[in-house]
Amino acid sequence: MERGWLSSLGTPLAALCGLAVAFAVRESIARFGLSRGYGGAVAAAGLLLTTSPLVFMLVTEEPFQQVKQQRRLGAYFREMGPFLRADGRFRWFIAVVSLWLTAITGASYFTVYAMNRFAAGPTAVMGYTIFLTLGAGLAGLVGGAAANRKGYVRVFLCGLAGTTLSMLVAFLGPWAWCMYLAFGLAGASSSACMMGVVYLPMEMGGQDNVPTYVGISSLVRAPMGALAPLLAGVYLERFPYPPLFVFCALSGVLGAFLLARYVEEPRSQAPATTPELPREPKRKVAA
C-alpha cells in the first residue's frame, strides 16, 4: 500500500527536476549550439543515470522473513511458460502492456509533427517539454494517492484513456496550442500507466513470485518498447502522421477494454498459485 504514496511523492519531485532540466538544456543549446549543447545534455543525463544507483549503496536493507530460493537466469526463462499458462490475468496484463507501448509510440513523434505542421521553434519545443513534465508530475501526485484507495487497475485505465485522448487531440487539433494539451495528456497518461506497468506484477505475484513476475513483465516490454517506435519511424518515412495517431488511439482503446474485462485488481483476489516449475540441477560439491 505504501507504493502509491511513494509514487505520489517521487513523481512530482522528478517532474520538478525535469522542469529545471528543460531550462538548462535550452541555455546549453543557446550557448554552445544545437549539436554541442544537445550532445552535452544527453551526455550529462547518461552520467546521472549511471551514477544515481550508487545512492542505494548508502541504504542498509533489512532481511526478508521469507526469501525465495535463488535460481539461475536460465531457470527464470524456463519459468515463463508455466507462469503464463497458470495465471490468465497475467497473460492479459502482458497483452495490455504491449498495446499501451504501441499506443504511446505516437507521442514519440509529437515534436516532429508539431515542427512540420505548425513550424514549432525551440521555445515551443521547450514549452512542450514543460507541459509533458507537468502532466507527468500531476498525474503521479493524484494517481499515487488514488492507487492506494482504488488500486492500480483503475489508475492504469485512466492512463490508457489519457493516451488515447492525447492522440486524438494531436490528430484533430486545428491550432498550434492544441499540441501543448496533447503533450500534457501524454505526460499524464505515461505516468499513470507506468504505475500499473511497474506495480501490478508485484501484487499479482504475491510474496513468493514477485521476482519472476517482474522479470517476465520487463522481458516482454523491453523489445516492444524498442520495436514499436522503430516500426513507426519506418511507416512515417512514406506515410503521413494522422493514420499513425488514429492507430495508436485504437490500440489504447483495445488495451483499456482488455484491462477492464480480464485483469481484476490483485488485492481483491487470492494470490496466484505457483505452477510446477523446473527444478535447478543440484551442484556437485567437491570433496
Image (cartoon, helix red, strand yellow):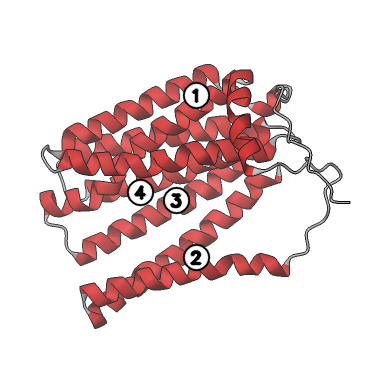
Identify the residue shown where x is 42% and y is 26%. Answer: 255
The kind of secondary structure element at disc 4 is: helix
The residue nearer to you, when weighing 257 against 176, is 257
Q: CA distance from mark 2 to mark 1?
A: 32 Å
5 shown above or below 247: below
Q: Which of marks 1 and 4 precedes in the sequence?
A: 4
Q: CA distance from mark 4 to mark 1?
A: 23 Å
Q: Amino acid at mark 2?
A: Leu
The kind of secondary structure element at disc 1 is: helix
Disc 4: which residue: 184
* Image quadrant in which you'd find residue 241: top left
Q: Amino acid at mark 1?
A: Leu
Q: CA distance from mark 3 to mark 2?
A: 19 Å
Identify the residue shown where x is 22% and y is 61%. Answer: 124
Q: Amino acid at mark 4?
A: Gly
Left or right of 57 in this view: 144? left
Q: Position of residue 286 (x, y in %)?
A: 84, 51
Q: CA distance from mark 3 to mark 1?
A: 21 Å
Disc 3: which residue: 136
Check contact, mark 3 vs mark 1: CB within 8 A. no
Q: Where does the N terminus fall, quadrant-wise?
A: top right
How crowded is the residue under tag 4: few (<14 C-alpha within 10 Å), some, or many (20+)? many
Q: Position of residue 176 (x, y in %)?
A: 17, 50
Q: Which of marks 2 and 3 precedes in the sequence?
A: 2
Foreground tag (3 vs 2) = 2
Identify the residue shown where x is 59% and y is 40%. Answer: 215
Check contact, mark 4 vs mark 1: CB within 8 A. no
The image's mark for residue 49 is: 2
How crowded is the residue under tag 3: few (<14 C-alpha within 10 Å), some, or many (20+)? many
> Which residue lies most toward the bottom here?
31
Foreground tag (2 vs 1) = 2
> In this view of the protein, can residue 185 be seen by the observer?
no
